[in-house]
């Protein structure tokens, strides 16, 4: 390492062999795993905006000891369940569609991107009732949408939420929604 240069022990790689950490092309180097995952999210968003499917390329974060660092999705504490579309409201105004739900968070699609990393009020509409929750926007990734019969392209956002400070009643309500799916 050169003097005066901070170590960058985390690398984003594109695997091409069975050993994903060692048989891979290095894309970039980062000081922290979180920084590397933010860069992967940026790359995936850029791919979607240019029309490439976001799952067409695999990116992996590797540490200084050549170990694959699990992503947030791999480290998820609770299993997510996919849904028939349910309506969800953010801060009482923005509306979206619930894509999947777990006891710890949700994934939704919405036309407007909510601000990241700040608390947000969430209401899930289910069986003629509304379940109010507090959440944090963990990630918001834009994607281009175009219907087959349309000429215009619009941007939608895939938004990952992490639920905050859930009461026992709210936890029960979320479990009931998951079980009732």
Image (spheres, rainbow, N blue to C red):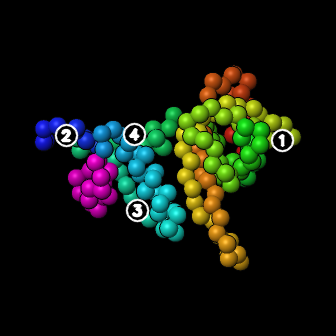
Q: Is residue 27 visible?
A: yes
Label 2, on which residue? 5
Q: Is residue 3 left or right of residue 97?
A: left
Q: Nearer the viewer, mark 1 or mark 3?
A: 3
Image disc number at residue 2? none
Name the image quarter holding the N terminus. Answer: top left
- Earlier residue among tags 4 and 2: 2
- Earlier residue among tags 4 and 3: 4
Q: CA distance from mark 2 to mark 1?
A: 57 Å
Q: CA distance from mark 4 to mark 3?
A: 20 Å
Image disc number at residue 57? 3
Label 4, on which residue? 34
Q: CA distance from mark 3 to mark 2?
A: 30 Å
Label 1, on which residue? 127
Q: Is residue 48 left or right of residue 178?
A: left
Closer to the camera, 26 or 69?
26
Q: Nearer the viewer, mark 2 or mark 1?
A: 2
Few, some or many residues within 10 Å of mark 4 (<14, 14–19, 20+): some
């Amino acid at each position: 390492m050169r003097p005066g240069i901070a170590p960058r022990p985390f690398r984003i790689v594109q695997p091409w062999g069975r050993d994903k950490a060692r048989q891979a092309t290095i894309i970039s180097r980062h000081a922290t795993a979180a920084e590397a995952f933010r860069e992967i999210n940026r790359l995936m968003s850029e791919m979607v905006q240019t029309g490439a499917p976001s799952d067409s390329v695999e990116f992996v974060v590797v540490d200084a000891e050549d170990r694959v660092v699990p992503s947030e999705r791999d480290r998820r504490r609770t299993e997510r369940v996919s849904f028939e579309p349910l309506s969800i409201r953010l801060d009482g105004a923005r509306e979206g569609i619930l894509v999947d739900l777990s006891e710890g968070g949700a994934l939704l699609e919405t036309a407007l991107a909510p601000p990241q990393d700040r608390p947000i009020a969430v209401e899930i509409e289910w069986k003629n009732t509304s379940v109010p929750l507090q959440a944090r926007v963990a990630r918001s990734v834009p994607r281009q949408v175009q219907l087959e019969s349309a000429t215009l392209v619009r941007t939608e956002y895939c938004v990952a939420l992490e639920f905050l400070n859930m009461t026992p009643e709210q936890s029960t309500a979320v479990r009931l929604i998951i079980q009732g799916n």
